[in-house]
Image (spheres, rainbow, N blue to C red):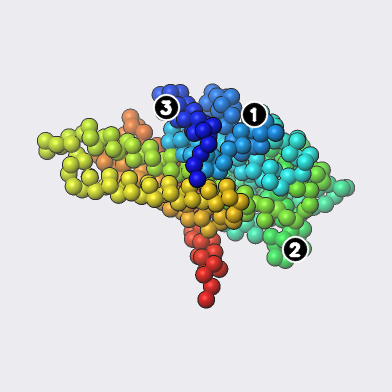
Amino acid sequence: MSLTRDEEQMVALVRDFIDQRVAPRVREFEEDDVYPEEFIEQMKELGFFGLLAPADHGGVDVSMECFARVCEELARGWMSLAGAIGGHSVITYLIKTFGTEQQQATYLPAMADGSIRATMALTEPSGGSDLQAMRTHADPVDGGFVITGSKTWISNASHSGLFGLLCVTDRSAAPAHQGMSVLLVEPGEGFTVSKKLPKLGYRGVEACELVFDGMHVPADAVLGGEPNRGWAHMMRGLEVGRVQVASRALGVGQASLEAATRYAQERESFGKPIWKHQSVGNLIADMATKQQAARLLTLDAAQKLDRGERADLEAGMAKLFASETAMQLALDSLRVHGGYGYSKEYDVERYFRDAPLMIVGEGTNEIQRNVIAAQHIARNKI
Ligand SMILES: Cc1cc2nc3c(=O)[nH]c(=O)nc-3n(C[C@H](O)[C@H](O)[C@H](O)COP(=O)(O)OP(=O)(O)OC[C@H]3O[C@@H](n4cnc5c(N)ncnc54)[C@H](O)[C@@H]3O)c2cc1C
């Protein structure tokens, strides 16, 4: 499949935004570690928050393949900018796909123009991998729900006007996932963004703890209107999320590769450009090959979603391979740069700090391997 002309233009627009506006100032923004309002405002104007929203609700409604390429370009400039639209895009997709007409009319136009930014809240202090053991619950009270519990590591939390909260709505359900719902929660009484967590990279975008202390929400906060269907909804959303994280990894990998390719031609030792030393040349060859493989896996998963097919296996493979590749490429690029790779004067040290997030986020790579193995066996039963 290929992109439409409009989609190609969108990718080109993002590339220009990164090269012209972001690249010259990214080190200053990342050093400050404050939410990059200026870039976010520009991203709103350029329509990046509405990439997955339907056109009749004010969105751009691009294909998943285009979305992946846009996210790669953003992350090539600064992974945090792709992170700023990560959870937001998953929640947009969930509301577009499973939301009631009222939920779509209420949220999608404001999400498309970025005036409401959304995030997804799954992880709890007691664990992010074992989601079925989650404790945050919403009990039915007076025709609505009362939410009690806490979430942690929630990206963009202080700047979000909408939380796609996965929580338990039927505490007696067995297995537990049959009693879970996604609630669309707006900040209000009984809700606190309690703590901003210090972290290695992914600077500018905050990750926070959330506390729900007997917060009341109406019954129509349940995504799709019908409770206890949230697990299936969120698993579908995570397929999109994993393609997004794979695309972020592609961006970091591409930036690492480009930096190494440039430096290996500029830097000389023993009377020749360092890439002509076989060890360095081999590194560059392996980097370029792995990056291409990661891209093809990611686009394959995106295309499956575009065809409306189940893509948990493919999205898991793309996320696993692209994130491990980004980490390897960041390290190899640092190697190619010698001592300068360790210096704050070059961007490579940032790639090295940003890459690990994609290994951990949206389900760790160990969890991806579990998903891939289970799906692979299920599709190849003897
Ligand atoms: C910067 C940042 C931003 C984040 N943003 C969000 C967000 O917006 N929303 C959100 O909901 N979450 C977010 N997360 C949380 C992230 O998704 C979790 O950290 C991740 O899912 C892992 O959960 P955990 O940290 O509790 O690790 P644990 O689940 O405690 O896992 C610890 C280790 O054990 C391994 N492990 C656990 N169970 C198994 C198993 N069955 N098989 C093999 N290995 C296993 C894991 O792979 C990992 O290596 C974010 C995290 C970070 C660091």
| Count of numbered circles in the view | 3
Above or below for 125 versus 95: below
Nearest to viewer (mark 2 / mark 1): 1
At mark 2, the secondary structure is loop
Nearest to viewer (mark 2 / mark 3): 3
Q: x, y (%) of residue 337?
A: 27, 38
At mark 1, the secondary structure is loop
Q: Residue furthest left?
A: 271
The tag on residue 173 is: 2
Q: x, y (%) of residue 171?
A: 76, 60
The tag on residue 113 is: 1
Which amino acid lies under the numbered mark 2 shown in the image of this protein? Ala
Q: x, y (%) of residue 286?
A: 30, 49
Q: Residue furthest bottom?
A: 382
Is residue 155 visible in this depiction of the protein? no
Sequence-wise first label, 2 or 1 = 1
Which amino acid lies under the numbered mark 1 shown in the image of this protein? Asp
Toward which corner of the image does residue 76 lie, by quadrant?
top left
Q: Residue at x 60, y 46 (%)?
A: 152
Which amino acid lies under the numbered mark 3 shown in the image of this protein? Asp
How crowded is the residue under tag 3: few (<14 C-alpha within 10 Å), some, or many (20+)?
Answer: some
Q: Residue at x 49, y 51 (%)?
A: 300
Sequence-wise first label, 1 or 3 = 3
Toward which corner of the image does residue 217 lie, by quadrant?
top right
Closer to us: 264 or 381: 381
How crowded is the residue under tag 2: few (<14 C-alpha within 10 Å), some, or many (20+)?
Answer: few
Q: Residue at x 53, y 47 (%)?
A: 302
Q: x, y (%) of residue 42?
A: 55, 24
Q: Residue at x 31, y 41 (%)?
A: 333
Q: Residue furthest right?
A: 142
Q: Read off the residue under disc 3.
A: 19
Q: CA distance from mark 2 to mark 3?
A: 51 Å
